[in-house]
Amino acid sequence: MGLSPVGDGFRGFVGEAFTMRFIPSREDIDPVGDPYRTGNVLQWEAVESVGPRQVLVVDSRNDTSAASAGDMLLTRAMKRGAADFVTDGAFRDGAAIAALGFPAYARATTATTRPAAFHVADLNAPIACANVAVHPGDILVGDRDGVIVVPRSLAAGIARPSVEQERLEAWLHQRVRDGEPLWGTYPPSAETLRAYEAWRSAHQEHQNQEARA
Ligand SMILES: O=C([O-])CC(=O)C(=O)O
Ligand SMILES: [Mg+2]
């Protein structure tokens, strides 16, 4: 999605999308001097309704001129069990967020608070985050490189093959580190795949023995 992790205190996350959509703010509805944001409480409502293993995903229109949240809102989302907070805009309090170790992704850090530029138009509606369509309930997966969106309808079908592919690539990676050439290793030839399967069976048997011991 073109977004970067904030801090290095986490490896990644997986969770279900809980979306929040911004439009430009207007002074009559979003006065910056109102600490409780009485004209537009949806931002607070989002954080106070996000559930365990959900991800707050913000459509900030790729605009970093004001924050989607800061360390207070992220800490509260973390306490509610959220898996991550991702915005195509910016966060306030970047250093404090980095120290949380809670997965968070954004384009930038800003001092400017949300109502100065954005009004929260709705929650849990389809959005565009970093120009990627996100529907409520889609599965977001993040690592140190960034975030991807998996359509809800495809998630169950690709979960296991994805884990299998990661395992295979970890093993192939070790072979390349050990000095094997790319030819026959990456992508793996039938012979390499047989060697992998043999290793996996032995490894599995070893793990079963340990589990029994
Ligand atoms: O006022 C804001 O934009 C939110 C904020 O700083 C926080 O959550 O810590
Ligand atoms: Mg703050």
Image (tube, grey):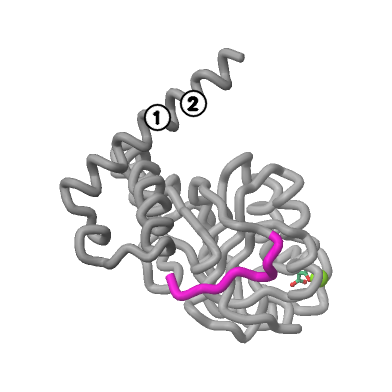
Name the one closer to the observer, 192 or 119.
192
| Residue 195 horizontal side relative to residue 105, left or right | left
Check residue 206 in the rendering and tell me which mark sits there, or answer none: 2
Label 2: few (<14), some (14–19) or many (≥20) C-alpha neighbours in 10 Å: few
Residue density around tag 1, few if under 14, some if 14–19, many if 20 or more, within 10 Å: few
Nearest the viewer among 120 and 70 is 70
Magenta includes 143? no
Question: Ligand 2 is found in which quarter of the picture?
Answer: bottom right
Q: Secondary structure at mark 1?
A: helix
Image quadrant where residue 132 sits: bottom left
Tell me: residue 16, above or below residue 88. Answer: above
**Res. 101 in view:** yes
Q: How far apart are the two marked residues, 1 and 2, measured between alpha carbons?
A: 6 Å
| Residue 202 - label | 1
Q: Position of residue 91 (x, y in %)?
A: 68, 74
| Residue at position x 69%, y 70% in the image | 7
**Viewer-closest of 54 and 6:** 6
Q: Position of residue 59 (x, y in %)?
A: 50, 68
**Label number found at residue 75:** none
Q: Are marks 1 and 2 in contact (CB under 8 Å)?
A: yes
- Mark 2 near ligand 1 (CB under 8 Å)? no
Q: Residue at 65% across / 70% down in the picture? A: 6
Tell me the quarter of the picture where residue 43 sits.
bottom right
Q: Main secondary structure of the magenta part?
A: loop
* Residue 6 forms part of the magenta stretch: yes
Q: What is the magenta range? A: 1-9
Name the outermost residue toward the left. Answer: 190
Considering only vertical position in the picture, is 37 above or below 92? above
Residue sitting at 26 percent across and 66 percent down? 182
Which quarter of the image is occupied by the N terminus? Answer: bottom left
Q: Secondary structure at mark 2?
A: helix
